[in-house]
Image (cartoon, rainbow, N blue to C red):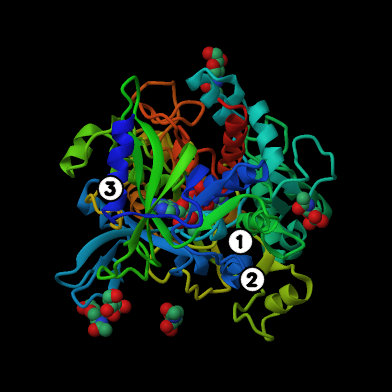
Amino acid sequence: MTVFARLLGAVLTAGSLTAASPQDEYDYVIVGSGPGGGALAANLAVSGHSVFLIEAGGDKSEDPLQILPILSPVAAETPGHSWQFFVEQYADPDQARRSPRYTYRTTNGTLYYGLDPPLGAEPLGIMYPRGAALGGSSQVNAMNFIWAPDNEWDHIANLTGDDSWHHEEMRRHFMAVENCTYVPEGTEGHGFEGYIDSSLGDGASIAANDNAARFMSELFLQVEDIEVDGTDTMVELLDRDMNGIENDRYEGGFIFNTPAAISPTVGGRASIARHINSVVAAGHPLTISFDSLATKVLTKKTFWGKPKAYSVEYMVGEGLYSADGRYNTSQTAETRTVKAKKEVIVSGGTFNTPQLLMLSGIGPRDELRKHGIPVVANVPAVGNFMQDNYEVPAMNDVDLDPCTYTFDEHDPCFVQWQETQDGPYNDDSDILYLSTPGFGGFGGFYPGYSNITITPTSWRTPIVKMQTANAAGTVKLKSANPREAPAINFNYFTENVDTDLQAISEALDLLFNAFDGTGIPYEIAYPGPSIDWRQAFMDVAFSHHASSSCRIGPAGDLDYCVDSKFRVNGVDKLRVVDASIFPRAPGGMPNGPTFTISRKAYETLMEGS
Ligand SMILES: Cc1cc2nc3c(=O)[nH]c(=O)nc-3n(C[C@H](O)[C@H](O)[C@H](O)COP(=O)(O)OP(=O)(O)OC[C@H]3O[C@@H](n4cnc5c(N)ncnc54)[C@H](O)[C@@H]3O)c2cc1C
Ligand SMILES: *[C@@H]1O[C@H](CO)[C@@H](O)[C@H](O)[C@H]1NC(C)=O
Ligand SMILES: *[C@@H]1O[C@H](CO)[C@@H](O)[C@H](O)[C@H]1NC(C)=O
Ligand SMILES: *[C@@H]1O[C@H](CO)[C@@H](O)[C@H](O)[C@H]1NC(C)=O
Ligand SMILES: *[C@@H]1O[C@H](CO)[C@@H](O)[C@H](O)[C@H]1NC(C)=O
Ligand SMILES: *[C@@H]1O[C@H](CO)[C@@H](O)[C@H](O)[C@H]1NC(C)=O
């Protein structure tokens, strides 16, 4: 032991590392402030533990881009709020480049997306935003707040043999997170004192819009065999609770209004970042290091057992990461370290958690060696088995929308939002959930996607395919440089191909049948007329709910990354708490489930296990 202490001392005096101020030691050091790490840091600090939270971005929680729901896509594309990764969706470059959103860097440095890149353009991939400021992606996401199906939790309980993951136990954690504003206080299964306000989209405004109501009626008929007689019935049906305690809520199909992480008092995003700030303001022992990119978890060898995490190294500066729009290779940055008395917790999200683990020598041995990184623990599951839901955008040109999207006094929807903090701009997008939850309002990600020239005559309905069972995605290092984003490939449609494509096909059929039933004239603008639907789906599919790149499983099994107590295989005092641990995509929407596991991690740590 003394030997190691001295070695460390020598490194410190050599001046390459600077201690973090004001202290250099905290109970917990947490990397990443999203729904995984941010919520955990706040909970631990409120319980009196000193926490050092390392966040690559700044705090933008009072910026209207993060508050006003309709502007959330802009936040997801604005440097300082988010990072833009470029990912591959297929191993085969020809298939990959069939996507109309595939993006290239042209020889003069501008970005081009489309099917006809200029000569010499460098292929980058499909744009894939991630929040990169206090609160992580939950500050820039689309705010749909949907809990996972019960069987996803039961699956984890089965897989790990740990009954505390059973859905009834996990419901408790969800309730601790939630402040539900749309059911009467005391309703079973909901929480009313948590840090995330939840509300329900405005069913009445859908029912009040003639064409939308006709369309919804048609869907009720086709999906549920219900003939809707009148506005009140429709509102009642739409307001059925997707997050209720009933465990048949995912059985069969039903159409519902989406619960959203939107606070009715604010008329905007229910913000974990604001909650974190309030915990700091209340004097709890939480220190946040902003604009700080964690580059390595430092581990010590122990003579008697596993290596042990004791410290985190990080660089200080804005826009240090290559996925950041402000990135500048010639920028230099100071490197610091901070020590953890108890534990280090990595919560960088599905792309960054495996990257940081691998930079720290924890990952597949061959991958590490390729980049000259000394192996601390050979954990093949790091950066493997990544999953995502597929989304296939469908777009119809019909007439449905009163908003002008000019956000000024001539825009009735904006005026309504200013006066009442309510109306379409405080709603979820023009979503329609089929038998599987979906996410709406756009046709995928590409440079400039958030500059929505909204055509009021367009009805866009991405179909989300959950439980895709394609665990073929990978996150690999491009280099040992912590500032360089990793190589990400989802390897779409590698496993379970026929089932997934068939399900998407049926969902689309249903959608267009419902449109046909309304008698409203429309044209399919997207995916467009096609003779080969399977090919068309593969070409336009996209996703943005990545998970599972450090999946949970039986303790010590190297096909898995962490055990049921979030402990990384082969390393002591190191846990992962974020969306990367889900063994399968947790239903259609990972945000609520990630808050839920964060609360569970808090309880696990409090129990001292
Ligand atoms: C545009 C968009 C729309 C979405 N819509 C929805 C939706 O409607 N509903 C839903 O349920 N989900 C949605 N999601 C997904 C959801 O937000 C994420 O699944 C969830 O936030 C994941 O939480 P996390 O804690 O795992 O990671 P993140 O929320 O991504 O947080 C990771 C944090 O770690 C920081 N970080 C990463 N690496 C480092 C490092 N090396 N050093 C320091 N800090 C680091 C990042 O800056 C970030 O703040 C959406 C996501 C996006 C991007
Ligand atoms: C850059 O190159 C692209 C493709 O060749 C071209 O369309 C664009 O106008 C160029 N932009 C500038 C600023 O030169
Ligand atoms: C869990 O295991 C039990 C018993 O083997 C089985 O009946 C059940 O279907 C499993 N549940 C899930 C969600 O995997
Ligand atoms: C829960 O939401 C209600 C309604 O918006 C609000 O009045 C209350 O203060 C919130 N409670 C907490 C604990 O944030
Ligand atoms: C990049 O950083 C260098 C060094 O700090 C600086 O001189 C240069 O102006 C920066 N370039 C841009 C485009 O900001
Ligand atoms: C947004 O799109 C419009 C119309 O396509 C274009 O004129 C404008 O320059 C774009 N704005 C930005 C910020 O890209």
- Give the label, 1 or 3, closer to the camera: 3
Quarter of the picture containing the N terminus is top left
Say left or right for 260 vs 471: right
- Give the label, 2 or 1, closer to the camera: 1
Can you tell which mark lies on residue 430? 1
Kind of element beneath mark 3: helix
Kind of element beneath mark 1: loop
Ligand 5 located in image quadrant? bottom left
519 lies above or below 301: below
**Near-viewer residue (137 or 115):** 137
Would you say the beta carbon of the disc 3 residue lies within 8 angstroms of ligand 1?
Answer: no
For the residues labelled 3 and 2, the Cα–Cα distance comes to 63 Å
Residue most extreme to the bottom: 410
For the residues labelled 2 and 1, the Cα–Cα distance comes to 9 Å
Can you tell which mark lies on residue 11? 3
Label 1 neighbour load within 10 Å: few <14, some 14-19, many 20+: some
**Mark positioned earlier in the residue sequence (1 or 3):** 3
Q: Are marks 2 and 1 in contact (CB under 8 Å)?
A: yes
Mark 2 — residue?
A: 401
**Kind of residue indicated by mark 3:** Val
**Near-viewer residue (460 or 383):** 383
Q: Position of residue 385 (x, y in %)?
A: 35, 35
For the residues labelled 1 and 3, the Cα–Cα distance comes to 56 Å
Q: Place residue 18 in its image quadrant.
A: bottom left
Label 2 neighbour load within 10 Å: few <14, some 14-19, many 20+: some
Kind of element beneath mark 2: loop
Q: Place residue 561 in its image quadrant.
A: top left
**Mark positioned earlier in the residue sequence (2 or 1):** 2
